[in-house]
Image (cartoon, rainbow, N blue to C red):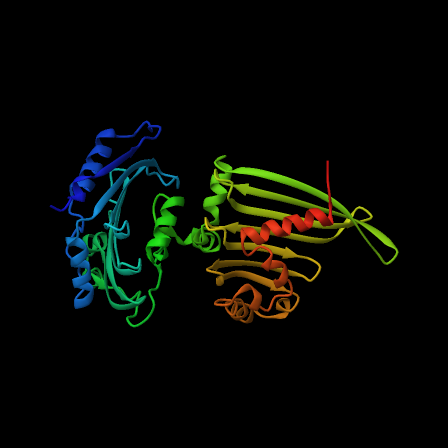
């Protein structure tokens, strides 16, 4: 007999300091409503047969369900007292996330809510996403059916309820009728920027699970979208947050030396900060080297590198002042998958579009192949093993500072 994973429902209640207007009864009602309501809210809306069949098969699977319900104060100081957030994650027998549902409601006596449902294939790729959002006045819903990251079907509707209520003429009443959304074109990759929020955290299971490690809720306002793309999207900030919380250990090595030439003698310094997990695996490394002449810094090299659990570089932020270059790369399996930033002496002369095109040219290339003056230095950071050899070499080149 198959095990009924849905009966193994894990409910995690996270307590917060209560606000004077906090209603425990309301929180309990929302939690009960979220946990008892249908997992899919409504049937799959896609008419595409392949998508409909795939979603139906996932709904029929004996999936393990983990549920989380959170009550938290509102961070945006807009008069709302609390957010109530529910999340349900459904895993198959191989522990692969196949379905995700999240429910978010702002409690201020109003009716603001957001519901997102996402379905993933066995490879972790998004195949179906739909959402329903609403306020006291406006409601919006849409769905996406995807195949190989291309949208094969899309439909969405916007309705302004208070516009209909306030309509005084036939023309105003006509304008208040539901309208079709035109955010997405079929046959194209999914457009993640939608109105005031962003859907990129739903793109695949790896991204979604890592986002949930950082944030409570995978929906980002436009005001924080640039920060999300620049740092949050590559998840280096998971390591930073653990470092701030004291969950990771740090070692600091200070080195000093001399640089001679041109009948001058210059002071050299090198500071290495290694951040480890509990198993002494390097998670992050900061190396800053400087050359000082007559109490003035004339050269600097500043590199911060982040590593995955296998010891491979996945994010690097570097600044070299001698052969000037400043860059931020996101790396996967040794290949650059995103260039957040690149600037050197040549790009300073380019216009914005040329700089963007040049940055995109890095994508898909190995570190050894990029048009970067300091690429040989970057290879020293490519794995924790190569990093270890770099540090040993630096210790031989410099003297240990007491």
Nearer to us in this view, 150 or 277 = 277
Residue beneath the point at 49% across and 58% down = 330
Quarter of the image containing the N terminus?
top left
Residue beneath the point at 55% across and 71% down = 354
Residue found farthest to the left: 1
Residue found farthest to the right: 263
Residue beneath the point at 37% across and 54% down = 207
Along the horizontal axis of the image, is 222 left or right of 146?
Answer: right
Which quadrant of the figure has residue 169? bottom left
The image shows residue 249 at horizontal and vertical percentages of 53, 37
The image shows residue 360 at horizontal and vertical percentages of 50, 68
Which quadrant of the figure has residue 371? bottom right
The image shows residue 235 at horizontal and vertical percentages of 45, 50
Nearer to us in this view, 349 or 321 = 321
Q: Is residue 135 visible?
A: no
Which quadrant of the figure has residue 110? top left
The image shows residue 65 at horizontal and vertical percentages of 22, 44
Along the horizontal axis of the image, is 345 left or right of 279?
Answer: right
Q: Is residue 328 visible?
A: yes
Q: Is residue 28 above or below residue 135?
A: above
Instruction: Count the marks.
Output: 0
Along the horizontal axis of the image, is 335 left or right of 181?
Answer: right
Quarter of the image containing the C terminus?
top right
Residue beneath the point at 19% across and 39% down = 8
């Amino acid at each position: 007999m198959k095990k009924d994973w849905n009966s193994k429902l894990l409910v995690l209640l996270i307590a917060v300091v209560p606000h004077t207007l906090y209603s425990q009864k309301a929180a309990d009602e929302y939690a009960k409503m979220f946990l008892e309501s249908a997992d899919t809210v409504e049937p799959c809306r896609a008419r595409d047969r392949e998508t409909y069949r795939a979603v139906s098969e996932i709904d029929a699977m004996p999936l393990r369900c983990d549920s989380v319900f959170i009550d938290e104060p509102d961070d945006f100081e807009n008069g709302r007292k609390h957010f109530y957030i529910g999340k349900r994650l459904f895993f198959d027998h191989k522990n692969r996330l196949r379905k995700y549902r999240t429910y978010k409601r702002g409690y201020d006596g109003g009716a603001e809510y957001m519901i997102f449902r996402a379905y993933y294939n066995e490879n972790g790729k998004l195949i179906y996403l739909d959402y329903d959002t609403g306020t006291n006045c406006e409601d919006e819903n849409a769905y996406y059916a995807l195949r190989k990251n291309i949208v094969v079907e899309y439909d969405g509707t916007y309705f302004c309820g208070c516009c209909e209520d306030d309509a005084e003429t036939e023309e105003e009443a006509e304008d208040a009728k539901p309208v079709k959304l035109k955010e997405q074109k079929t046959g194209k990759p999914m457009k993640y920027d939608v109105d005031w929020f962003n859907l990129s955290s739903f793109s695949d299971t790896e991204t979604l699970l890592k986002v949930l490690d950082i944030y409570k809720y995978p929906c980002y306002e436009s005001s924080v979208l640039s920060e999300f793309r620049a740092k949050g999207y590559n998840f280096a900030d998971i390591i930073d947050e653990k470092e701030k919380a004291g969950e990771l250990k740090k070692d600091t090595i200070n080195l000093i030396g001399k640089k001679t030439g041109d009948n001058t003698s210059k002071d050299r310094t090198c500071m290495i900060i290694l951040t480890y997990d509990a198993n002494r695996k390097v998670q992050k490394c900061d190396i800053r080297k400087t050359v000082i002449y007559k109490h003035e810094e004339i050269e600097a090299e500043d590199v911060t590198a982040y590593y995955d659990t296998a010891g491979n570089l996945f994010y690097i932020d570097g600044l070299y002042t001698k052969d000037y270059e400043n860059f931020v790369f996101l790396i996967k399996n040794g290949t650059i998958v995103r260039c957040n930033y690149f600037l050197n002496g040549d790009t300073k002369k380019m216009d914005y579009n040329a700089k963007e095109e040049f940055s995109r040219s890095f994508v898909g290339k190995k570190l050894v192949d990029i048009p970067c003056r300091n690429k040989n230095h970057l290879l020293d950071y490519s794995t924790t093993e190569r990093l270890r050899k770099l540090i040993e070499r630096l210790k031989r080149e410099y003297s240990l500072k007491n």
